[in-house]
Image (cartoon, coloured by chain):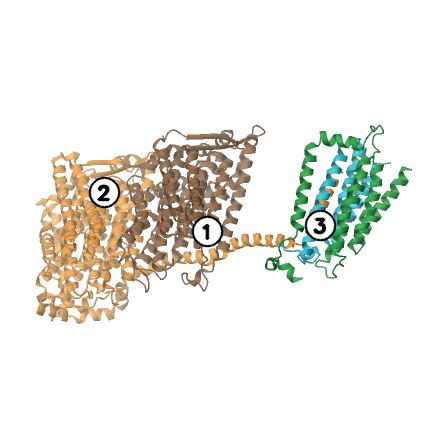
Chain colours: A cyan, B green, C orange, D brown
Amino acid sequence: MNIEWFLVLSALLFTVGLIGVIVRRNPVVILLCLELMLSAGALALLAFSRMLGNQDGQVFVLIVLVVAACEVVVGLGLVVAMYRRRLPLDVDEMKELKG
Amino acid sequence: MEQIAFFCGAIGALGGAIAVVALKNPFYSVLALVIHLVFLAGIFLLLMAQFLAAALIVVYAGAVMVLYVFVAAYVGGIEEPRWDSSPELKLIGPIAAIALFVAISIAIVGSGLSALSTTGPDDIPAGFGTPEAVGHLMMEDFLIAFEAASILLLLAAVAAIVLAGRRREDPNKLPKGGESS
Amino acid sequence: MTATWAWLVLLFPLLGSMTIGLTFRVLPERTAGLVGIAAIVAAFVCGILALIGLQGEPHESRHVASSLWEYASVGGFTIDLGIYVDPLSIFMVLVVTGVSSLIHIYSYSYMKSDQGYHRFFSYLNFFVFSMLVLVLAGNFIMLIVGWALVGFASYALISYWYRRNTATKAGMKAFVINVVGDIGLYIAAILIFKNLGSVDYTAVFEKAPEVFSVNEWEIVAICLCLLVGAFAKSAQMPFHTWLADAMEGPTPVSSLIHAATMVTAGVYLIARCFPLFELAPTAADIAAWVGLATLLIAGTIAIAVTDLKRIIAYSTMSQIGYMFVAVGIGGYSAGMFHLMTHAFFKALLFMAAGSIISAMANMQDIDKMKGFRKAMPFTAAMLIIGALALSGFPGTSGWFSKDEIIDFAHFRGGMYDWMWIGMLIGAFMTAIYSFRIIFRILPGPACKEAEYLEQHGHVIHGEPKNPATGQLEDTEVGYPGEEHHIAEQAGGMKFAMGVLGVLALIGGLVQIPGVSEVITHFLEPTFEDSIYAGMHPSVSQAWTGLAEGALISIAGIATAWLLYIKRPDLPARFRSRFSAVYTLCVNKWYGDQVIDFLIVNPVKAFGRFCNGVFERGVINGATAGVAGITRSAGAAVRDMQSGLLRGYAVLMLFGILAIVVYFLIRSI
Amino acid sequence: MLSSIIWTPLLFGLIGLLVPKRFAAWVAAFGAVITLGLAIGVLAGFDPDGGMQYVTDVTWIPGLGVDYSLGIDGVSIFLVLLTTVAWIPAICFSAMRGTERPALYYLMLLAGETATLGAFLAQDLLLFVLFFDLMIVPFYFLFGIWGRDRGGENDPEDSPGNGVVTVQSATLKMIVFTLIGSLLMLVGAIAAAVISADGGELTFSMQTIIARGLPDGSQNWIFWFFAAAFLVKMPAFPLHGWMPDSYRAAPLPALAVFSAVLSKVGAYGFLRVVLPMMPDAADLFQTTMLVLAVASILYGSAMAFTKTDLRLVLGFSSVAQLGFITAGIFAFDVTGAEGAVLQMVNHGLVVVPAFLIVAMIAERTGSTELGPMGGLAKKAPVFAVIFLIVSMATLAIPASANFIGEFYILNGLFQVDAAWAIVASIGVALAAFYALRMYQLTMHNPLPEGADSREISLRDALVLIPMVGIIVVLAFCPQLIIHGSEPAVDSAVAVVREVAR
């Protein structure tokens, strides 16, 4: 099975996640889309790992999973905090960081 | 056989991904992501990453997604408001993203990576992708990365508690945005 | 030893100035005045001792150069803190300190009621110090130092009554014109160093004939630059406009600076640099012609104006013009002689004028003065002596000195004969305007001020008014106030005037042709290398000249008598007949206006252009442009910082896209 | 030794943060005095003919060839002395009046001193650039925090014709101008080091770069990169656009040292960096630089006698004086350059008391506008005399050391071409006019209503009189400075003369 297929699939998944991040405004969904993009990256890493016959890539993916988990934890913590403060769950409303 | 498995997995993973983006209700989006992850794990298996496939299912589809479900349930299935502060993003974003996809695809399929277009070596060592092999690597070559990751996890946990933790309500200290909605 | 005395000559006035200046809070006023007088008298005594020392030397080594320390030295351009003592400088030292001593004594009484007594004496001493630096300087840089310090001291004294706007303006004018003159000297010194490798008098005068041929353009340029300085300081055309305005200062100041010392600096400079001027006869001729023009023009103005001090000021310009002619055509000792006698009689005239002005409660208009003969007999006598000497009445000092110059021009012959004629006309005018003063002020029925003085024995109370504008004065800073009851009672004034009166009368006796040529002999060591050293008219020629001068002088006095006593209606008729000429003269030949038009206004316009147009338009525009670009760039970036999370995501996406595309293109 | 001179001010500034507020000023003053003591100590052991002395050379960033390298020679020693002297009255003046947030204020002032001293002592190009840039930082804060908006209808202390200046816009202009210059200079410095290394070992040591030399073509553009920074800092016409606003808004004691010392760093840079490092370019662009210098003289003078704000009169007079200094340097004649060095010191010594006097005048009349001033001399004779001496030194009256400086500059210019000297000497006459005008309009003429003419206080006199004393002593003996700096100046100029020949 040619490795290109995996890479193209990875790119496709990444694009879908990216579109989600840009288009959606619910922070929970955005986080989900980020997961998609991360998993796409993981897929690419695994594909390369397979191709080179080297398991380092797999360790990378594991670390990526850990980081993703962290990001999820913090991100969801933020979502809960927003909800607690009765802020709207819409990233467009969070514009305090404006320059 | 392998191709069939790949295409099944690919269609499932892609369908799940599209569903995540397309579904209005975040709760359903979470479920769609679970489906995506399951199919993705299958693809992982094709790439001889048994341990990671298992980890994906167990940690992700199992633990993390449960967290999502809880949060989604907690905050409720909120419909997105009609009003969009920058509608142009809805157009520009996807177009740019697709452009990126096209560019990457050209890189992959076109001449850019042609040297890499291979199925990989056939003489894969036994135990490639098994927990044992990955464990060895982690404990030997990538120990620092591993420890760093664990510290990161710890920090993230603390951060989540701080962020989401209940504190004494002080209505005066609410940020302005809270009242304006 | 001579050098030591010369240094002491410099030291005493400086010490005096410092002492009075630093102790103005503790020293009683009179004591300050006495300290000032003592300092100058001490300088005078040291000058005499230096003279004795110098005369003790053999004839050919009567010059001493002395240096305290190296003032500055870069790349061979060495400037010493040095002095140069020779008969010429000692002559000047004696004239300056001698006349200054008398003026100090006069001021001691004259300034009695002034609020700024300390300040006045401190300035006055400083002025004398500066003047002495000028005459004793051993190199061109020290000369410039003295030159500029004199200008500064002159500024300080002119705007002494500094709450008068007219006084401060006049001070500014004098200072700036003097600085222009200084710049001439700067350039001259630089040129001299460039060509001769030194600025020391001895070295320069020795080398100059070897380096330059006659009328080579560089030596002419040097001399012309020197002349700029000389003209500015001596109020010659076209730098003369400051002198009349300088009469804003107290009368002793006019007497000291604008008659006896400062304005003669230009004459001294040319005499001092005679080796250079003799190499550049063109420049020397220019000096003489400018002197001639000045003496004629100033004479016509002096006949027309009515301000007492300004008449005397213009007569000063005119007399300095004579000296310029003298040193320009090589009659150095004649010029220096006239410088000395002029110092006597002009200081005397100013002092007498000051006396009358104080009696007039500071009015200076001679149209309002009348009949002071009885009220102030002593002053009147002094005024007459001064006027006689000024107009060159036979036997007075002015007769000997002025006619020596006139005669020397005739003796040179050629084109100098034109100067001779011009100077004779000038002498005629001098006699007219000198006696115009006398005939307008002294005889006739007394005006109310003179009458008051006669009856009460002290001068009239007057409102302190600015004589130039008629406005009430702010007396706080020492404008002579109501208690200004001097006039001729004050002993100091009488003494100073008396001494000067005697000197003005008999001062000429030191230089009687064929009898006692003291000045010529004394100055001989300085001028013995001059190409004109052996040239002087024979005794008979000299006496012929003196006789002509006597005739002219008497004719002038007679004319004045005719105009102002016998037929007092004549001047008015002349005025209406030749109204154009009169307007020209009374407006001082429009000198101020011409300078304003040619220099002041363009400079001011340049300033306004820079400030109003260039700075505002170009510089601020460019600055605003830079700021604007920065700001708009900032604004553009700020718009991107919308705070919109998804916007940032898109930006990142574009970034990634750009990188990917870049690598794609590169790989092709 | 040199390190201690550089860092002592900063150290005392930091100590000032720790002590109670009311002592901060005196800690700062003490620190400034100690620094002066150290500088005098260096002077005591200084040998005019000894070239670079007290050399410190520590490797700092080995990969880039950047060293922490300090040294002092005949040019820098007098500028270091000027710096250490100038800061004392500025600090004492502020200390007697009190400021808001004193600890921070004095920290900033002293940090400014540290950076300035560093720029004068650095012998490594990158270190020089670093200190040069650091100088502006504390002054940005000093102007920004303790400065004041000027103009507008609500400001009775300003005449309406001057326009409105806010502290923000003024400091922004200053920063933008200076940073553009500095960045160009940074590029120039890196280029100089890289090009001179020519593939060999990279080093920023000035002496090594000078020894290696730069190729002609590179010199030409690197020259302008440095010149831009220096001309902005001076400031020279036409790059002075930032100056008027900053001068109007700045607090006067800080402005005094800023105008007195920081402007000299630019001129010093020409002498230290540009001439030895880029002699060919300096020779090539001599005429251009002289045109700029003479334009600065004339333009600065014209502006100085047109402006009615004392701060601007002094500011533009500095433009003119710095024009003289630049002209002297670019005459490539040892008398001209020596005159320039002398003039740098003299001008610094004159400007500090001048600005402090302006501050005192403002206390009496309520503003720095010349229009409604006058007549202060009556009740304040000592004050008037001090101001008179300072004014006379400003206009370089003969007998002041300023005159010797200016005269040597004119002499140097004359060696290039008589026309330069003659045009530049117009500036001398204009200086007489604007300096005297400044004195007259404040001290003479009738006293306006409401002005408070009072004598200078003893404490203020103690601040000013030492400065005036130094001016007077130098007037009697300018050779003190000339003797010490001539060999160094000569060697700086000799390089270019060699090329020109």
Looking at the rendered structure, the secondary structure element under dot 1 is: helix
Residue C187 seen in this snapshot: no
- Quadrant of the rendered image containing residue B109: top right
Q: Label 1 amino acid?
A: Phe
Q: Position of residue D275 (x, y in %)?
A: 46, 36
Both on one chain, marks 3 and 1?
no
Name the image quarter holding the C terminus of chain D. Answer: top left
Which residue is identified by label 1?
D143
Q: Label 2 amino acid?
A: Arg
Q: Nearer the viewer, mark 2 or mark 3?
A: 3
Q: Position of residue D189 (x, y in %)?
A: 53, 37
Instruction: Give residue A76's mark.
Output: 3
- Quadrant of the rendered image containing residue C252: bottom left
Q: Label 3 amino acid?
A: Leu
Calculate the distance from the C-alpha at mark 3 to the C-alpha at mark 1. Answer: 47 Å
Residue at screen point 77% across, 32% down: B134
D131 left or right of B96? left
Instruction: Give residue D197's mark.
Output: none
Q: Closest to the observer: A1 or B166?
A: B166
Return the chain for callout 1.
D
Calculate the distance from the C-alpha at mark 2 to the C-alpha at mark 1. Answer: 55 Å
